[in-house]
Image (tube, grey):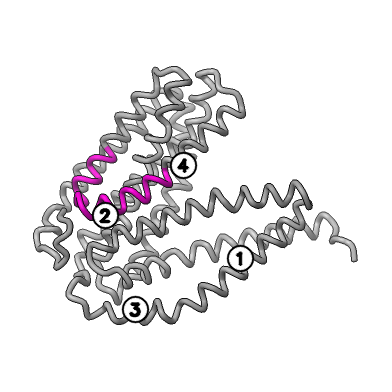
Amino acid sequence: MGWPDSRALLYGVIAGLLLAGLGGSTQHPIASTLVAGAFPGLRSRGALGTYNFTGDVGKVALPALFALIAASLGWRHAMLMTAAIAVLGAGMIFASLQSAEMRAKESKGNSAAGHDRPWAFWLLFCIHVSDSAVRSGFLIFLPFLLQNKGADLPAIGLALSLLFAGGATGKLAMGWLGARLGVVLSVVSTEAATTVLILAILPLSLGWTMTLLPVVGLMLNGTSSVLYGTIPEFVTAERRTHAFAVFYTGGSVAGASSPFLFGLLGDAIGLVPALIGVGVLALLTIPLVAALRPAFRHPTPDPSASA
């Protein structure tokens, strides 16, 4: 039995990408709600940070596995094996959902559950949108900045790997640190450090820029874990899935639109001024997170951290 013709393959790939995107986008708010339910109170910050970190690990590990299989067996077999892994993973998730749902239901009556504070949630949402825009804006300009410093294609690929590795570490580390340092201090620290680091790498040589990129990635991605982990404190368990859905959608829209908008800005004022604008945008989140302070004045039952 031969393979389908190229047009059928193209349509199949398009359909597969649409389904994969739909499934990947749908599972995030549901999974985040289950994680928050299983780890109520301030523990949800660390748990959601770990959840986001493992997602980044998968984004690195699966393409590497695909490349190895494709190199030895061809891309079609690699796709089939990747699909088999996805089906196996879906079965494992389905088998574990019942226990996860039961644990989440048990935690609904826990005194550490969040209370509806719509104003605080929308402030958190605005911080998240700005943070996503900064992250995407920096990513769209970074290859051009490295090229101006003399980087070739392999060096740019290495730089992106260093940035993503730092970002994955940031999601894990800041999820746990956020529960100990508090939301305000964590976000202010990461956003201020993001601005300083973006401005710092502009005049640096290629070597020093590569050295700093893991730290840049850590700060760029670290804020997101703190923000995700704070949602359960501002939304009751009954409304949490919808809140996570709105939150993830806002970040995705900001991440998709900001490269286009920053690209227009870069064409108008140049690469370096546009990157300075990206760095300054990170600072705009600081007054927003400072405005969240009243939401943390009522202590939660978990004494391990404070805002």
Mark with earlier residue (4, 2):
2
* Most common SS among magenta residues: helix
- Residue to which mark 3 is pinned: 103
- Residue to which mark 4 is pinned: 165
Q: Amino acid at mark 3?
A: Arg
The span from disc 4 to disc 2 (Cα, nearest Å) is 26 Å
Frontmost of labels 1 and 2 is 1
Q: Amino acid at mark 2?
A: Leu
Left or right: 6 in relation to 248: right
Residue 5 spot, x, y in % from top left: 85, 58
Frontmost of labels 4 and 2 is 4
- Residue to which mark 2 is pinned: 124
Q: Amino acid at mark 1?
A: Ala
Is 164 magenta? The answer is no
Q: Nearer the viewer, residue 135 or 96?
A: 96
How crowded is the residue under tag 1: few (<14 C-alpha within 10 Å), some, or many (20+)?
Answer: few
Mark with earlier residue (4, 3):
3
Left or right: 271 in relation to 183: right
- Residue to which mark 1 is pinned: 86
Q: What residue do we see at 60% from left, 23% from top? A: 152
- Total numbered labels: 4
Residue 76 spot, x, y in % from top left: 77, 56
Element under label 2? helix
How crowded is the residue under tag 2: few (<14 C-alpha within 10 Å), some, or many (20+)?
Answer: many
The span from disc 1 to disc 2 (Cα, nearest Å) is 33 Å
Left or right: 1 in relation to 254: right
Mark with earlier residue (1, 3):
1
The span from disc 1 to disc 3 (Cα, nearest Å) is 25 Å
Range of residues picked out in magenta: 167-191
